[in-house]
Image (cartoon, grey):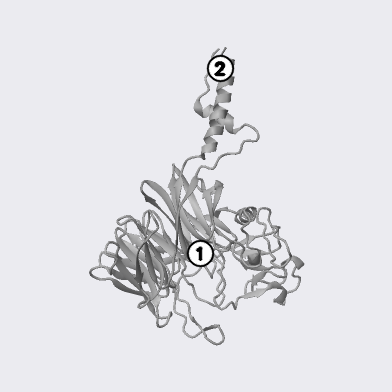
Amino acid sequence: MKRTLTAAALAAAFAALPGIAAASPLSFTHQWTFAHSGGQTSEIASFDAVTNTLWVVGVVGIDVLNASTGSLVSHIDTSAFGGANSVAIHNGLAAVAIESSADRTLPGTIKLYDTTSRALAAGTNSITVGALPDMVTFTRDGSRLLVANEGTPNLDPVSGIYAGYDPAGSISIIDMASRSVTANATFTGVLPTNAVRYAGMDFEPEYIAVNNAGTKAYVTLQEANAMAVVDLGTQKVTSVTSLGTKDFSLPGNAIDPSHKDGKIELRTADVKGLYQPDAIATYETGGKTYLVMANEGDTREDDLDKVRAKDSGLSGVPADLKQLNIAKPDSTSGALVTFGGRSFSIRDEAGNIVFDSGSRLDAEAIARGIYNDERSDDKGVEPEGVALREIGGRMYAFIGLERTTKGAVAVYDITDPASASFVDMIVTDGDISPEGITTFMAGGKHMLAIANETSATTTVYAISPVPEPQTYALLLAGLGLMGSIARRRSK
């Protein structure tokens, strides 16, 4: 009897052969790196398809770069308005979030730029929002612009402690047709659904993501270890939910808790971590919305909620945890709590965890020799930025790691939220501290842009959904072997 093995069957048989590892489904090709200068840093990048440019915001202004070559098109100085924190672009219009230069507790502004002329847009181009606008994002259809107003008090110049007026955190909702604020959603009267961390501060919005339908916005409240949901119909905050803690004593959640033990070693530890995500992104699958969060961890800016475990005065601190920085308001004797999840998580709309990367990010950084042991006592690799991209019918998450010795972005396949899997880690020499990352299409290719804060560099990679050339060779050899077997069986 003649038997015919299909290509799919041959590939499956090949993959099952002992000693043959599955190939990465993506390859990454470095396109260019641009070094910013003149006080310009690299914080957040946004792509403009109209002009094929990448707009990189960095405190004193915006560097507009050619997305194909990385050459500087022009620099836009925004320092006269205040500190530039974030940028988002839709259909040739760039929205830049700027905090007040006189006093960050005063209302900030959104400046609108025409991406073609790179000048302030015609008509209304300056919109007043809440204090310390730290992040901006358009809804998918561009009809509205959402602004996370962090509302942080000033630091006393002598003591370095928060002092004076603490403006309320809020989310400004801007109607782009009229270019006016239709609501400043606050947290007044909103009761948390569970125990939320306060640490002596009100809620401070950090990052916003919007669902595909444009009906809900999800807001990370990093210091509070919580997320808020905004109904974009009523333009009100409808819920605030604590994100809970991560148990580092469980298998798969190991950490390196000390920077002074002379070793880099992940081990389980009797401590829990506040997730405290920074960036958040959304995607839909199976008719449900999922939230992808980078669990960076964060303290108050004046560090009054942080103490080293050995100096906490708490009893029963394990010897292995004495160097660990812990959360003072949240820790008790025998129940230590630290900052950050040292991971990224996927949650459902209610905030329930569907997937967490456990200790994999730290482990991969260690394996590549880029783990910074000096950060072991304080949040590890600190996942900060998140970007998503559908490539070849699969959904991928790109997670920027702020505290590695070289610029690093972890890549996960999150097509099935409950079974997300590690794909690769992109490491770039010369880059330090990815702050914001974004994906886009240019020249028919999937692209990844990485804004690196400490090195003041912006790097772009092209992403291809194909195996490496040597994988093809192995595959063809395997297919030839299996084909030979099939022919012998058919005789």
Disc number for residue 278: 1
Q: Position of residue 444 (x, y in %)?
A: 36, 46
Q: Is any part of residue 310 visible from this angle?
A: yes
Question: Is 284 placed above or below 96 here?
Answer: above
Q: Position of residue 463 (x, y in %)?
A: 45, 47
Q: In the rendered image, which quarter is residue 272 located in?
A: bottom right
> What amino acid type is highlighted by mark number 1?
Asp
| Identity of the residue drawn at 44% across and 79% down | 167
For residue 97, side relative to residue 245 (left or right): left
Q: Position of residue 441 (x, y in %)?
A: 38, 50
Q: Nearer the viewer, residue 176 or 411?
A: 411
Task: Look at mark 2 in the image and give the residue it sits on.
Answer: 487
Q: Position of residue 175 (x, y in %)?
A: 30, 66
For residue 475, side relative to residue 44 (left or right): right
Per the image, label 2 sits on a secondary structure element best described as helix
> Answer yes or no: do the residues labelled 1 and 2 have beta carbons within 8 Å?
no
